[in-house]
Image: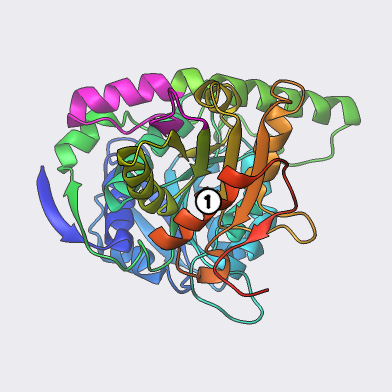
Amino acid sequence: MAVEIVTGNHAAGYALSVAGEANREARGVCAGAYPITPQTEIIEFASRFKFTKGSIVPVESEHSAMGVCIGASMNGARSFTASASNGLSYMTENIFTAGYYRLPIVLVCVNRTMGPPWNIWADQSDALLMRDASLIQIFAETNQEMVDSVLLAFRLAEDHRILMPFMVSMEAFIMSHTLMNTDLPEQKLVDAYLPPCDIPHRLNLEKPVCVGGLAWPQETLSMRVETDEAFQRVPEVYEECRKEFQKIFGRDVGGFIDPFQTEDADIVLIASGTIATTTREVVKKRRAAGEKVGMIKVKVYRPFPERELLDACANASKVGVLDRSYAAGVGGIFWQDFRAVAQGRRDDLLIQNYLTGVCGGDVTPDLIEEVIDDLAQRKTAGRPVWKGIDV
């Protein structure tokens, strides 16, 4: 393995490329490519990669980029693409299509604020628009986690018990353009980790079928039930992929969540992405001062880690959910999901939402300190609290 100082975009482009190359003895790789700030470098990296079998196909839109992936995957190729913000929303129809066709396409999203007005800074609302799609979702915290998560994504998505598209997200500029020490695994290790892509329902000229035709309600419903059953299998298959990853690469890719100092914590903060890094350091400081504060990093967002989160909050009386997203008129999206999970099971738990870093604002240690102070003095939960802006 080689540790290099690379950006998040370089890390993502490398991981996608070596994963595609690992399928050279099968039906190769094919990716749809369309640029959008701040993910363009990912596609540029993959376009320069010398694949033994396969190619990157430049197209005229994000919708078509995913369309290429659908066609490639339906023919048995390993397939991937990348996008962000309004580009991702333009893909929406085909992202849902890929999920309903049960195609194991890997998508990297570089989280960027939805426009207008046009804003190129970090906001997770773009990825979270896809929360109801048949799409496994991970939010990476570091460049290393981006590499590792992309490789795991291919292995899990292509498992015959799952067969589902998979999106790995990282935050614009905070990760995508920031240099970090990153272990970029050699091709032979990636080859050992990723078996040949075998899509059992791929198109076959010797057995022609009609794809995407009209189906009756009960037939369509049965497909949705099968999708739900596949999602229920994700935790078990994820752990298998995680163990194999550690065996081959010598490090742990991490679980659905990463609890920190939660065992005896009265106050717990829930965060994802790079906000978790800042929050962890503040929790260390508060712990040193004798305060019973903990935090949980949510890595896997879909399927939502219900049991894991409740177990990690078992001894807490107050939870603050830090959201880098906003659903109009409602609040943060992680908060909505966690509040729904706790309802009827932890009615004694005060759950407060804090909108942090929305539209690309900085999430500083001082801001996290303010959140903890506000949560500590609360007797009841209120409406989502905007942080980092005077409103």
Q: Residue at x 71, y 20 (%)?
A: 345
* In front of the other: 199 or 204: 199
> Callout 1: 10 Å neighbours few (<14), some, many (20+)?
few
Quadrant hosting residue 293: top left
Q: Tell whether 231 sits left or right of 172.
A: right
Query: For this view, does 362 lie left or right of residue 225?
Result: left
Q: Secondary structure at mark 1?
A: helix
Q: Residue furthest right?
A: 217
Looking at the picture, how far across and down is residue 266, in whole percent?
52, 30
Amino acid type, residue under disc 1 in the picture = Asp
Query: Residue 46's x, y, as percent?
Result: 32, 60
Which stretch did the figure color magenta?
Answer: 238-266
Residue at 29% x, 64% y is 45
Q: Tell me, yes or no, whether the highlighted magenta stretch contains residue 259.
A: yes
What percent of the width, then of the height, locates residue 42? Answer: 35, 63
Q: Where is mark 1, residue-wise?
A: 373
